[in-house]
């Protein structure tokens, strides 16, 4: 898992809460997706997870296409 420099924060990156709200799931579910690399994430210098906005949208669209967003498909890096 890479680290995100503070200079890169905010542009195209989503927090755990942002992803959970978009997916309609609990934040713990998003954390599990990150832990098992179902949804790639990086960590800020402060240790907070960030998700690439485009990758999240692609993963959720793919999962939705296959019957739901409960478990997004793995995203090719």
Image (tube, rainbow, N blue to C red):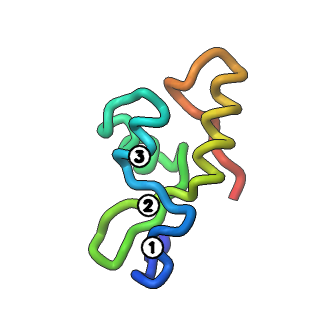
* Label 2 neighbour load within 10 Å: few <14, some 14-19, many 20+: many
| 18 shown above or below 28 | below
* Label 3 neighbour load within 10 Å: few <14, some 14-19, many 20+: some
Single out the residue that lies furthest toward the front: 11
**Residue 14 image point, x, y percent:** 46, 55
Instruction: Name the front one of labels 2 and 1.
Output: 1
**Residue 30 image point, x, y percent:** 40, 41
Q: Quick check: 57 left or right of 1?
A: right
Q: Earlier in the sequence, mark 3 or mark 1?
A: 1
Q: Quick check: 62 left or right of 8?
A: right
Q: How many marks?
A: 3
- SS class, disc 3: helix
Task: Determine whether label 2 and label 3 are within 8 Å by CB.
Answer: no
Q: Earlier in the sequence, mark 2 or mark 3?
A: 3
- 61 or 42, nearer to the observer: 61
**Residue 2 image point, x, y percent:** 49, 73
- 10 or 76, nearer to the observer: 10
Q: CA distance from mark 2 to mark 3?
A: 10 Å
Residue 9: mark: 1
Q: Looking at the image, which residue is at 63% across and 43% down?
A: 57
């Amino acid at each position: 898992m890479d680290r995100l420099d503070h200079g890169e924060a905010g542009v195209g990156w989503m927090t755990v809460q942002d992803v959970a709200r978009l997916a309609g799931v609990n934040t713990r579910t998003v954390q599990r997706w990150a832990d098992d690399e179902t949804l790639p994430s990086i960590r800020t210098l402060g240790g907070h997870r960030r998700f690439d906005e485009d990758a999240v949208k692609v993963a959720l669209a793919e999962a939705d296409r296959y019957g739901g967003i409960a478990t997004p498909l793995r995203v090719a890096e």
